[in-house]
């Protein structure tokens, strides 16, 4: 899987660099985000600006990561979500839980400070 982790104002940003985030790729993706949460990060942003398609397993994975972040006293937010992916988030109700921001900058700002 093609992804990297960077920081902006101390907030980790996991950048997914795949056109399709689907089931076979979720293990590495999930492991990366869980490691951040278990490592003490309380604010995590997932940049999905290159992702044009997600499957139902990905929605489930995002919801699971969101729940883990919240259970740890933190938050997980998405940035750069393309229209097709946003439609999937809306259809499944995931957008009622996971904050979606237009880009990384607005997601970082949403954490304040």
Image (spheres, rainbow, N blue to C red):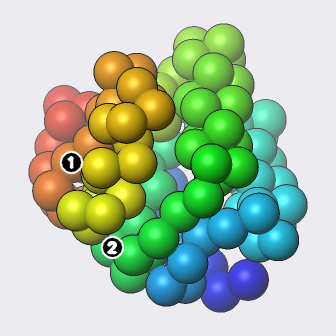
Residue 26 figure quarter: bottom right
Above/below status of 91 relative to 80: above
As drawn, which residue projects farthest toward the front?
Answer: 91
Say whether residue 105 is left or right of residue 13: left
Name the residue rendered at 55%, 78% in the picture.
Answer: 20
Above/below status of 24 relative to 86: below
Instruction: Give the residue at mark 2.
Output: 49
Relative depth, front residue between 35 and 113:
35
Instruction: Give the residue at mark 1.
Output: 101
Name the residue rendered at 82%, 55% in the picture.
Answer: 31
Earlier in the chain: of badge 1 and badge 2, it is 2
The reply to whether residue 63 is in sight is: yes
Instruction: Count neighbours of disc 1 (C-alpha within 10 A) and say few if under 14, some if 14 to 19, many if 20 or more.
Output: some
Above/below status of 26 relative to 19: above
- Residue 8 is situated, as x and y percent measured from the top left of the image, at 34, 61
The reply to whether residue 15 is in sight is: no
């Amino acid at each position: 899987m093609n992804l990297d982790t960077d920081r902006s104002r101390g907030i980790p940003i996991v950048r997914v660099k795949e056109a399709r985030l689907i089931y076979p790729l979720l293990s590495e993706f999930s492991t990366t985000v869980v490691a951040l949460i278990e490592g003490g990060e309380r604010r995590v942003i997932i940049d999905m600006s290159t992702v044009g398609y997600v499957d139902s397993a990905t929605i489930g994975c995002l919801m699971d990561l969101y729940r883990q972040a919240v259970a740890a006293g933190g938050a997980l937010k998405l940035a750069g979500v393309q229209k097709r992916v946003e439609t999937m988030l809306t259809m499944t109700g995931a957008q009622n839980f996971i904050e979606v921001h237009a880009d990384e900058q607005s997601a970082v700002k949403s954490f304040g400070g």
